[in-house]
Amino acid sequence: MAKLNSPELTSHDPSVYHFGSDNYAGAHPEVLDALKRVSGGHVPAYGDDPYTQRLRAWARDTFGQQALIYPVFNGTGANLLSLSSVVPRWGSVIAAPTAHINTDETGAPEITAGLKILPAQTEAGKITPEAVRAAASNRAFIHESQSCAVSVSNSTELGTVYSPEEFQAVAHTAHELDMAVHLDGSRLANAAVSCDAALADMVAGADIVSLGATKNGAMSAEAVLVLQPDRVSGIDYLHKVLLQLSSKARYQSAQLLAMFEGDLWKRNAQHANRQAVRLAQKLSDAGFTVPTQVQANTVIAQIDPEVAQAAHAAGLLFYAWPAVPSGHRFMCAWDTPDHAIDMLVERLAAHRA
């Protein structure tokens, strides 16, 4: 059996970079250093440790004294905990058709939380105030699932970004209609960098936020950020019921502190966004069409099916994106290097020739 420091335990080539997801990237060294620093000795469990307490203080200092924060394991868990605490079992959630909660969570909101998703029309992947009004349920009709919340993804699954003003307009409409506002911020850092805005400005208007860190360099840490405690119900208990309360919460909190107490979140997102712009330009120069504006770390390009198939067979990892005809999605991460972009485009162009 291989020992812990044996090279046989490394089963991948660390020099290879992929574009299938920013989740493919490893953890940032500063995050790993933070995990080492907090690991010695014993501290109370289930969030009563000093690091989770420090995280709570950061949330209050950053988002207002009313803010609450709950470390969780993953983005799906963050979304379930958020929505379950603001939507009753008889309620539904308005979201973009491409929203992660609608297309990529295996029906978890419906199966686990009993919440119906109501897809709304979008423009460039973004919900508008008019779309919220159009999708809202008839409160006088008992046979219709009642829309109780709007969920907005920023950045969107198309890589587009809501400005703070755009998001606040959607939130204002939702509140006018007596609906809660959930912000799926798994890539909120990328959206904030794109807008050159502070995190607090990006979440203004939301009642509850899924605050992402894993895609931006953490290892296994997300958070639910409550901005309006009067809007939530039972979240302390739901944190446990939905299997998101870690017994060793110091490890989630340490990662979140490493990411957000300083500017690591911004530095990582800036790099990922810059590399996405570079990739889009390289693809365009090689003759591929990039039909959507690159605003965050997502690039969607139109690739002929036979070219994509040949590229996949050659070991290039990226995903088809059916929301765009012949669309394929390429994600840049906090550690995506120039040479990986150059190699990707060269190989795609070679398969096209």
Image (spheres, grey):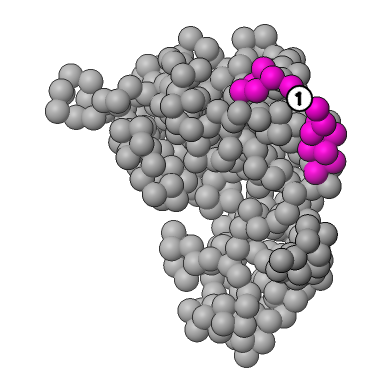
Residue 269, how many percent across, how many down?
A: 74, 45
Farthest-out residue, bottom: 353
Q: Looking at the image, is 312 positioned above or below residue 72?
A: below
Whether residue 204 sits left or right of residue 43 in the image: it is: left
Q: Residue furthest front?
A: 1
Please indicate, yes or no, whether residue 148 appears anywhere in the rendered image: yes
Find disc 1 in the rendering and name its residue: 42
Q: Nearer the viewer, residue 236 or 316?
A: 236
Q: Is residue 74 left or right of residue 121?
A: right
Residue 170: x %, y % from top left: 48, 28
Type of residue at label 1? Answer: His
Q: From the viewer's perspective, is residue 7 above or below residue 78?
A: below
Question: Could you tell me if residue 62 is visible in this image?
Answer: no
The residue shown at (57%, 58%) is 292
Residue at image position (43%, 15%) is 233
Quarter location, residue 185: top right
Q: Depth check: 211 or 189 in front?
A: 211
Please tell me which residue is depicted at 79% across the width and 48% down the height of the picture.
28
Identify the residue at image location x=85%, y=34%.
37
Count of labels in the image: 1
Q: Where the C terminus falls, by quadrant?
A: bottom right
Report the span colored magenta. 32-48
Question: Residue 131: x, y in percent?
Answer: 38, 36
The secondary structure type at the circle numbered 1 is loop
At label 1, counting other C-alpha atoms closer than 10 Å, the crowd grade (few under 14, some 14-19, many 20 or more) is few
175 relative to 220, above or below: above
